[in-house]
């Protein structure tokens, strides 16, 4: 039979035993519970996962920000890649007004987006605005966390 080992009112291990009398602090696992749950002598209580510290939460926000800034954004109905190569090409578009056409990778099936002269500046500006909006959202989340709130750090990121 399976039994939970209880120490200080908490399930610390689940083991296979022939009898609960084998060792003190054993409780029949068929009653429920899992490692980490509390045991009050009659029933198990699910112990929620420990909340992240402020520093851990801020690190999560920063990782999400970097992930978003290096993924993709929408421009002209297309999903534009923001990998290092694409960012370099987009930056060159913004700095080279004499260029006639620039090619930027788009996510999916190796497609590319050709920025003609009328859309070059718009693409560069949109990429910069997207990256800044992601940074602003991360900053707002961090300020919210520092204020003691618990925002959903996965929600409302710019697209």
Image (cartoon, rainbow, N blue to C red):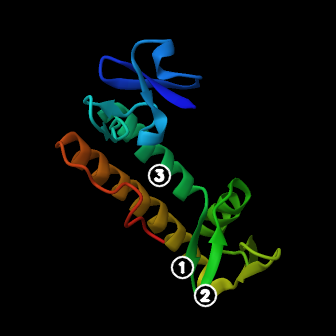
As rendered, which of 44 and 133 lies closer to the eye? 44
Residue shown at the point (65%, 60%) measured from the top left: 87
Residue 50 image point, x, y percent = 35, 35
Is 101 located above or below residue 70 in the figure?
below
Q: How many marks?
A: 3
Residue 90 image point, x, y percent = 64, 66
3 or 1: tag closer to the N-terminus: 3
Residue 142 image point, x, y percent = 30, 45
Q: What residue is disc 1 on?
A: 122
Q: How much space separates mark 3 and mark 1, taking CA atoms?
A: 23 Å
Q: Secondary structure at mark 3?
A: helix
Q: What residue is disc 2 on?
A: 118
Judge left or right: residue 92 versus residue 158. right
Foreground disc of the pair 2, 1: 1
Judge left or right: residue 105 versus residue 61. right
2 or 3: tag closer to the N-terminus: 3
Residue shown at the point (54%, 68%) measured from the top left: 127
Q: Which mark is residue 65?
A: 3
């Amino acid at each position: 039979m399976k039994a939970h080992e209880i120490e200080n009112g908490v399930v610390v291990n689940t083991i296979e035993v022939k009898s609960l009398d084998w060792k003190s602090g054993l409780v029949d696992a068929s009653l429920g519970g899992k490692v980490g749950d509390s045991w009050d002598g009659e029933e198990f209580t699910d112990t929620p996962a420990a909340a992240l510290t402020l520093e851990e939460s801020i690190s999560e926000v920063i990782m999400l920000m970097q992930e978003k800034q290096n993924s993709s954004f929408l421009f002209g109905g297309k999903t534009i890649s923001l990998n290092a190569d694409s960012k370099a090409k987009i930056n060159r578009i913004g700095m080279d007004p004499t260029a006639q056409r620039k090619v930027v990778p788009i996510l999916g099936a190796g497609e590319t987006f050709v920025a003609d002269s009328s859309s070059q500046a718009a693409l560069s500006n949109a990429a910069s605005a997207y990256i800044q909006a992601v940074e602003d959202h991360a900053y707002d989340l961090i300020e919210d966390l520092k204020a003691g709130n618990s925002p959903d750090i996965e929600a409302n990121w710019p697209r």
